[in-house]
Image: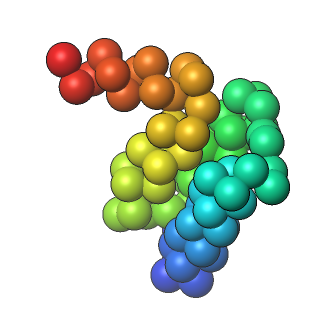
Amino acid sequence: MTLLNIVRARTLVDELCAAIDAGTVVPDEHELLALAIVVQREAGPLAHDLLVKLASRCRHGRAVLAKIAM
C-alpha cells in the first residue's frame, strides 16, 4: 500500500462507478468482488469508502449495506 496505489485505486473506482451509473459498463457481481479484494488490499485509509461505493452498485452489495443500516 503506497500513496500512488491509494490514488490509483480511488481513480479507478471513481471512473468505474461513473461508467456504471452512465450505463456504459455493466460488471457482474464476480467482477466487482474481484475489484473489491484489490481495493481492500491497496486503498489503505480510503478502502472503506471505496468499497461502499462499489457495493452500492451491485445487488448483493446493496443488500449488505441495507442490513448494516438497520
Q: Which is more toward the observer, 22 or 27?
A: 22
Residue 39 in the figure: left or right of residue 62: right
Above or below, comparing residue 21 to residue 59 in the picture: below
Badge count: 0
Residue 69 in the figure: left or right of residue 62: left
Q: Residue at the location (69% across, 57% down)?
A: 22
Q: Position of residue 23 (x, y in %)?
A: 74, 50
Residue 9 appears in the picture as rendered: no
Residue 32 appears in the picture as rendered: yes
Q: Residue at the location (38% across, 54% down)?
A: 49
Q: Position of residue 54 (x, y in %)?
A: 55, 45
Above or below, comparing residue 51 to residue 47 in the picture: above
Q: Position of residue 46 (x, y in %)?
A: 39, 63
Residue 34 in the figure: left or right of residue 51: right
The part of the image, by quadrant, that contains residue 52 is: top left
| Residue found farthest to the left | 70
Q: Which is more toward the observer, 23 or 63?
A: 23
Q: Residue at the location (51% across, 37% down)?
A: 55
Residue 57 in the figure: left or right of residue 64: right
Above or below, comparing residue 9 to residue 28 in the picture: below
Q: Give the position of the C terminus as an image quadrant.
A: top left
Q: Position of residue 30 (x, y in %)?
A: 76, 29
| Residue found farthest to the front | 22
